[in-house]
Image (spheres, rainbow, N blue to C red):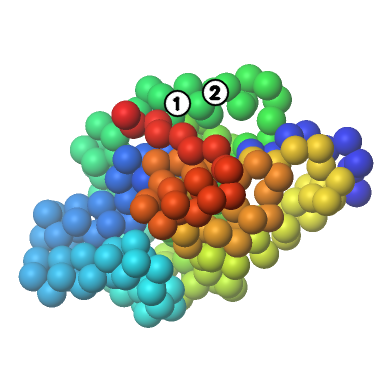
Amino acid sequence: MQNNAPTLVFFDLDNTLLPIDSDHAWGHFLVEKGVVDQIDYEQANNYFYEAYKAGTLDINEFLDFALKPLASHPRKQLDAWHQEFMSNKIEPNIHPNAIALVNQHLSQGHLCSIVTATNSFVTKPIANRFGIQHLIATEPEQNSQGEFTGKVVGLPNFKEGKVVHVQNWLHQLGIDWDQTQNSIFYSDSMNDLPLLEKVKVPIATNPDQKLAHLAKERSWQILHLFK
């Protein structure tokens, strides 16, 4: 294990580097395209998003819902839709302040990763757009032909699961987290409290009301990227 590991910088994605939730936006995009039922799917998409914000989301129930469209269409078609999604929904929400924050850390040689509960199909191209090589996300299962099955590989990257996945990732890199000089996590949500409490420098970024209150209580830095 490395004892001189670089500064570790973790970014949540939705409502942190982006001013939107990419998972929710992808669901809305599918509704707009007519890929899914407009009324039922939109209602369920909004229901799960509100549950996430309230801290009451059943992640397995949500993933059954969110990954079903991936299993219902060929990968080639999904990739084409995602390119359109990037152009129409994500690119208009790439904020210069978020790009500058990422570039600040990259330029200092920090080891950066996006750590998100949203699945990697939706988020990998977004991570690439930010210039971040490493992505720790919920992994949708694929068959031998690269088509999605609608299931999840292993533990969802959500709440305590984020800590588990980050630890596994660092272990693969030969980095001992406890020996690192510095670790930083930017997040907007109380759902990320386990990882916020694990790093040396938690930064409440565009925080929801509950996280903003906690950050003030604990004297954590609060950052507003989009104001």
Q: Which residue is mark 1?
A: 99
The residue depicted at 70 percent of the width and 25 percent of the height is 109
Q: Which residue is mark 2?
A: 103
Q: Name the secondary structure under disc 2.
A: helix
Look at label 2 and name its amino acid: Asn
Q: CA distance from mark 1 to mark 2?
A: 6 Å
- 8 up-or-down from 171: above or below: above
* Picture coordinates of residue 112, whole percent (x, y): 63, 37
- 168 up-or-down from 185: above or below: below
Q: On the picture, is 160 further left or further right than 91?
A: right
Name the image quarter holding residue 9.
top right
Q: Name the secondary structure under disc 1.
A: helix
* Picture coordinates of residue 104, whole percent (x, y): 57, 22
Name the image quarter holding residue 2.
top right
Residues 147 and 54: in front is: 54
* Residue 40 in sight: yes
Q: On the picture, is 104 further left or further right than 5?
A: left
